[in-house]
Structures are given as structure tokens and as C-alpha cells.
């Protein structure tokens, strides 16, 4: 354990107990400020801060790098969508050790999201409950912000953009809603994600149905003249039959891959029964659970997708990653890349470096020379579904 886990995290969690979103907002604003400083040539203070961050949190080793769907990833651990919703901190993510970062979720229309409080920590479960509701400044604002960076120094890691449906858009018009955002942002993202699995936008998960998802993919393909890699992000609560249909769609549309998984609405086996912030039972509180409670289910789904596709569909694994062992389990189940969010909040910024060091140790233990050789290594040792 480092100083963050021993001293800083308890202090911060206690200070923002009433509304953890405050800490998140302060963190993003700080990273945004540092990122803006990077645009000013000759800023010695920023250069010093960035150098110190890289020394503390980054680990560079060619054994961890991969070339996937036309992009180069310096390491397999990325930032999941939801942390940097408006793409304000993208200059900073490589300095914190990430091998890639996904911004958003962004919707075609700016929207405030659900009423606060809407983010809750569940320390007994090393989890979080959120019902943010895709709060963001909208696709137009994100496109304008990213356009200003086209003349800036090249980013060191791939940046993905997660696309969602605006709350006011009817389900039957969802395809055009996603297409509008993609049309504006396709010049600025290295890959794109169709998010149809958040539990916090009414009816959104119905878009995981094969017919409705097909209409969205048709719209994006018609607009994808730049041949950007496109992923679909699925929920951990899907039945195996539905996952099989999505695997088939991914193959039919030649998608770049599948992201498994989003948050879960399952409340079983939680140690937290009453939310301290509201005094209500956890079963009464709307929202999705992230962190350790979703770890095993997401890994199981990764293994299933790998088996169903015979390893032909790239998978980004997310859900409950806190340690190198957690990341290794998802990679050997079939994930080429993994993403973190809740674990990073609990473990602190040093987590990425610790995971990368642990993955290098795993490679040595298994006689492997690079991380690509570990992908799917254990996928066929046990059946699922």
C-alpha cells in the first residue's frame, strides 16, 4: 500500500462523503489546468510537473506494447469512459501511465444528467454506484475543443470517444443521434464506442437488441469514410443468447471489437445494504454498480466472447480491475486491452505502474516475450454459458 491508500484516500473519501462527485470534479479541473499549461511552450513549471508525474507513474517496456486495429498501444491498461466526459484532460493521461484513454460518454445534445447526488462510494465492496445519466457538454462542444488541439503536439497514446444517446431522443431515432455525434467527432478520435449499455438513460439497454443495434451500426458505417475502428460496449447483465447475437453482429459488420462490460444492475452479494449518503436500501437506489462486484462476471463474458469468436474479435475488458492479477485474468480470458476507473479511484494513481510491473512479472513466469502472447491463454480451460 502507498501513501494514497494509507493516508490520502481516507481523508478525501471522508471530506466528500456527502457527494463524491465533488472530488471527481476537482480532479478533472486540476488535470484540465495542467493540460492547458502543456499548450504553452516553455512553461518550465509544467515541464517539471509532467516530468515528475512520468517518473512516478509511467512504465515503458516494449513487451507491453501492441499494434491493434491500426493503432499503437504502449501498454494494455487504459482509462475507461466516464472519468473524462468532456475530453478536457486528454493531454495528461499518458503522463499518469495509461496506454490509452477513452473520453465521454458524449451525446449529440448537451445534457445535465440526473439529479444529484448520483455517485456513491461503497467502500465495503470496493465499488461505486452511479446514475450520472450521461451528463456532458454535447458533441458540438467536444468537437470544438478537440479541433483546437489539431495544431498541438501529438498525443502519445490512442484516444477513444464513447458515444451515447441523448435522453430526449426517442429510441426509434437513436441511429441518427449516434450518427450526428460521430460525424462531428470522427476527425478527432482514434477509435469510437457505441454505448448502448448504460443503465442510467431510460430504455438505452433496449438498443442492445440485434435489430436496433444494427440500425445504429448501419448509420455509423455510412458515415465512416475515415475507416475509424468502431466498438460496441455491452452490459454484464445480458443473457448468453443476446451476447451471441452481438458477437455475430460484430463479425458481420467487421467491428473493431467489443468492450465488456459496463456497470451492473445486479445487487446480489453486496456487503453494503444501506447507503450512508441517503439512508435508503441499496436495492432502492437506481444506478449501475462498478468495481469488484462486476469483476468475475465481466471476465466470464470476455471468455465467452473469445470462445464464440474463436479469438477473432478484439476485446477490451473492463470491470473490477484493482491489481495485476485482475488484469492478467481478463487478458488471459481473451482481452487484448483492459480499462480501469473504480479501481483507480480506490488504489490511487500509482495503480497503473503496479499493474504494469505485475504484468511483466506474469510474462516472465509464463515464459512469454510479449503481452499479445497472453491474450486468450486461459480462455479454453473452462466453459461458460
Image (cartoon, grey):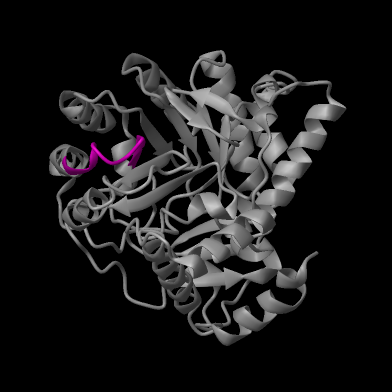
How many numbered marks, from 0 up? 0
Q: Is residue 264 visible?
A: no
Q: Is residue 374 visible?
A: yes
Choose top left, top right, bottom left or bottom right for residue 213: top left
| Residue 341 percent across, percent down from the top left | 55, 55
* Nearer to me, 100 or 135: 100
Vertical position of residue 121 compared to residue 58: above or below: below
Horizontal side, residue 356 vs residue 174: left or right: right
User: Which of the image's four quarters has the N terminus?
Assistant: bottom right
Which region is colored magenta? 184-196
Asked whether 193 falls inside the magenta stretch, the response is yes
User: Which of the image's four quarters has the C terminus?
Assistant: top right
| Residue 242 percent across, percent down from the top left | 42, 29
* Nearer to me, 264 or 327: 327
Horizontal side, residue 358 vs residue 339: left or right: right
Residue plotted at (71% across, 21% down): 377
Choose top left, top right, bottom left or bottom right for residue 162: top left
| Residue 115 percent across, percent down from the top left | 32, 75
Choose top left, top right, bottom left or bottom right for residue 49: bottom right
User: In the displayed image of the protein, which residue is found farthest to the front?
Assistant: 42
Residue plotted at (55% across, 53% down): 95
Asked whether 234 falls inside the magenta stretch, the response is no
Amino acid at each position: 500500500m502507498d501513501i494514497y491508500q494509507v493516508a490520502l484516500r481516507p481523508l478525501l473519501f471522508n471530506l466528500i462523503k456527502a457527494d463524491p462527485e465533488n472530488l471527481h470534479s476537482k480532479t478533472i479541473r486540476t488535470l484540465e489546468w495542467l493540460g492547458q499549461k502543456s499548450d504553452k511552450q516553455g512553461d518550465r513549471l509544467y515541464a517539471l510537473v509532467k516530468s515528475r508525474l512520468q517518473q512516478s507513474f509511467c512504465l515503458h517496456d516494449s513487451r507491453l506494447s501492441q499494434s491493434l486495429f491500426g493503432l499503437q498501444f504502449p501498454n494494455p491498461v487504459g482509462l475507461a469512459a466516464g472519468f473524462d466526459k468532456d475530453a478536457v484532460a486528454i493531454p495528461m493521461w499518458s503522463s499518469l501511465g495509461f496506454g490509452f484513454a477513452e473520453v465521454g460518454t458524449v451525446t449529440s445534445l448537451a445534457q445535465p444528467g440526473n439529479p444529484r447526488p448520483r455517485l456513491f462510494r461503497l467502500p465495503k465492496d470496493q465499488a461505486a454506484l452511479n446514475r450520472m445519466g450521461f451528463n456532458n457538454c454535447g458533441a458540438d462542444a467536444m468537437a470544438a475543443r478537440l479541433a483546437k488541439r489539431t495544431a498541438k503536439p501529438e498525443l502519445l497514446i490512442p484516444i477513444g470517444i464513447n458515444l451515447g444517446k441523448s435522453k430526449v431522443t426517442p429510441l426509434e431515432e437513436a441511429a441518427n443521434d449516434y450518427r450526428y455525434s460521430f460525424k462531428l467527432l470522427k476527425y478527432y478520435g482514434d477509435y469510437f464506442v457505441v454505448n448502448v449499455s448504460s443503465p442510467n438513460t431510460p430504455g438505452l439497454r433496449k438498443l442492445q437488441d440485434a435489430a436496433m443495434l444494427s440500425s445504429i451500426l448501419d448509420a455509423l458505417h455510412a458515415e465512416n469514410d475515415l475507416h475509424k475502428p468502431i466498438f460496441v460496449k455491452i452490459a454484464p447483465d445480458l443473457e448468453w443468447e443476446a451476447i451471441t447475437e452481438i458477437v455475430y453482429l460484430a463479425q458481420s459488420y467487421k467491428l473493431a471489437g467489443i468492450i465488456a462490460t459496463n456497470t451492473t444492475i445486479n445487487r446480489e452479494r453486496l456487503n453494503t445494504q444501506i447507503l450512508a449518503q441517503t439512508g435508503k436500501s441499496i436495492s432502492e437506489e437506481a444506478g449501475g454498480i462498478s468495481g469488484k462486484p462486476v469483476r468475475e462476471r465481466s471476465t466470464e463474458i470476455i471468455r465467452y466472447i473469445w470462445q464464440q469468436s474463436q479469438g477473432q474479435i478484439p476485446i477490451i475488458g473492463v470491470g473490477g480491475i484493482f491489481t495485476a492479477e485482475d488484469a492478467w485474468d481478463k487478458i488471459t480470458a481473451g482481452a487484448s486491452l483492459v480499462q480501469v476507473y473504480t479501481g483507480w479511484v480506490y488504489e490511487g494513481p500509482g495503480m497503473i505502474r503496479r499493474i504494469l510491473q505485475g504484468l511483466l512479472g506474469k510474462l516472465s513466469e509464463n515464459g512469454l516475450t510479449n503481452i499479445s502472447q497472453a491474450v486468450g491463454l486461459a480462455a479454453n480451460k473452462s466453459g461458460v454459458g
